[in-house]
Image (tube, coloured by chain):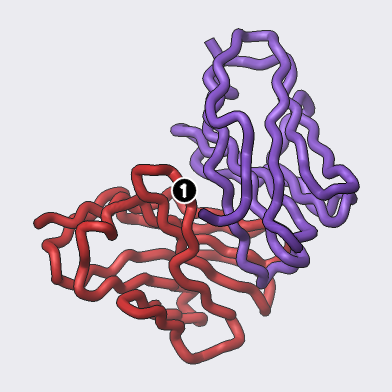
Chain colours: A purple, B red
Amino acid sequence: DSGVTQTPKHLITATGQRVTLRCSPRSGDLSVYWYQQSLDQGLQFLIQYYNGEERAKGNILERFSAQQFPDLHSELNLSSLELGDSALYFCASSVAGAFFDEQFFGPGTRLTVL
Amino acid sequence: AQTVTQSQPEMSVQEAETVTLSCTYDTSENNYYLFWYKQPPSRQMILVIRQEAYKQQNATENRFSVNFQKAAKSFSLKISDSQLGDTAMYFCALNAGNMLTFGGGTRLMVKP
């Protein structure tokens, strides 16, 4: 158990819908990262937050958005869902968000878009 | 831009034997960290080992060790005394800034 929690574990929805994935980082970690793991794209970095502020952005679609709240939990919002958005979404956290920090991964949320 | 390439999609090894997983990378940064993550069938991502680019000494964690060749931009993982629990996907990753870039992964099967 990494100490990072993600809810829900599984999510099944239809095309065009909007969903919210939630992540709670390890106690004491200030930085949160979101990753997408799909069969065709592999593991891709989406976005990073540090203490409530966006720090880095990767291959995140405009239909996706995220935020980190004052209590440091984070939410990833996916809208206008397409079949290709079906994937495993990981949240990770680290102490300070530095490039040398170990990132601790949550168990993931499996999203299925029908 | 940073890239990571794992050229072995699948590998297998007999229990108790040694196996080496390959990884090459590219970055224009001088300082960076390299990581190997393990993803067992449970899908949990688990850090196996990490290496700082400025350290010449290869990192070692119990049965896991790396061969870091900075000039060649190569970062291979050696697993000694392979165990059935080592069966997993292994991802090589690079962080030269604010993001982890992963390779495509190597699926390792340890056979009894």
- Which residue corresponds to mark 1? B44
| Quarter occupied by residue A17 | top right
Residue that appears at 38% across and 56% down? B90
Neighbourhood count class around disc 1 (C-alpha, 10 Å): few under 14, some 14–19, many 20 upward: some
In the image: residue B87, left or right of residue B58: left
Q: Residue A53 appears at what percent x and percent y? A: 89, 50
Q: Residue A29 appears at what percent x and percent y? A: 74, 61
Residue that appears at 36% across and 71% down? B77
| Quarter occupied by residue B1 | bottom right
In the image: residue A42, left or right of residue A68: left
Q: Residue B32 appears at what percent x and percent y? A: 64, 73
Residue that appears at 70% across and 68% down? A99
Numbered label tally: 1
> Looking at this view, is B64 or A84 the one in front?
B64
| Quarter occupied by residue B80 | bottom left
What is the secondary structure assignment of the residue under circle 1? loop
In the image: residue B78, left or right of residue B104: left
> Looking at this view, is B76 or A3 the one in front?
A3
Residue that appears at 66% across and 72% down? A100
> Looking at this view, is B55 or B81 the one in front?
B81
The chain identifier of the residue carrying mark 1 reads B
Kind of residue at badge 1 = Gln
Q: Residue A89 appears at what percent x and percent y? A: 59, 36
